[in-house]
Image (cartoon, rainbow, N blue to C red):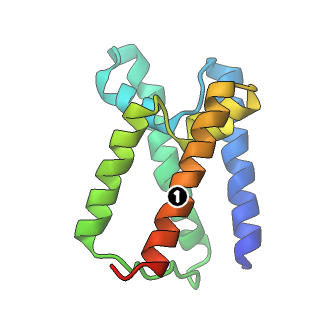
Amino acid sequence: MHPFVLATVGGAMIGAAAVLLMALNGRIAGVSGILAGAFHQPAHQRLWRWLFVFGLVLGGALPALVFPDLKAPEPQAGIGLAAAAGLIVGLGTGVGSGCTSGHGICGISRFSKRSVVATLTFMAAGIATVTALRWLPL
């Protein structure tokens, strides 16, 4: 299946999940907040959060299960760099009071100025990082 089709279907599923979570639960689909709440919220608030996280994992695995010939690209970084990047992203979501899903998908759709600024910052940092890693001799 063409990557554009997979990305389109994935984007539609993310949008549908965000709309359904807001409509059915009155919550914003900010993944970092949902994941943190799965550990720190009262017990009656944890089940839906764990189900949401499980759905994210299943949604990532589903294309490989449905299309066995579908191969993920080989990572170009080692496990250490990937772990460090994950920690930095986690730190950034704390400093930025949310992640790309909360700000970029849900915040912008609610016309939040703060989310527009946060998303522009995420994008600028991502562009700068990719540019530095591809063009600078590191």
Q: Residue furthest left?
A: 80
Residue located at (30% from left, 28% from top): 39
Relative to 49, residue 136 above or below: below
Q: Residues within 10 Å of mark 1 (few under 14, many from 20)?
A: few
What kind of residue is marked 1?
Gly
Q: Residue furthest front?
A: 136
Relative to 78, residue 21 above or below: above
Q: Quadrant of the C terminus?
A: bottom left
Snapshot quadrant of residue 18: top right
Residue located at (35% from left, 18% from top): 41
Q: Quadrant of the N terminus?
A: bottom right
Horizontal and vertical percent position of residue 100: 56, 43
Callout 1: helix, strand or loop? helix
Horizontal and vertical percent position of residue 72: 51, 78
Horizontal and vertical percent position of residue 97: 46, 28
Seen from the viewer's position, the closer of residues 25 and 81 is 81
In the picture of the structure, the residue carrying the numbered disc 1 is 126
Seen from the viewer's position, the closer of residues 58 and 107 is 107
Residue located at (64% from left, 40% from top): 104
Seen from the viewer's position, the closer of residues 100 and 67 is 100
Horizontal and vertical percent position of residue 116: 67, 35
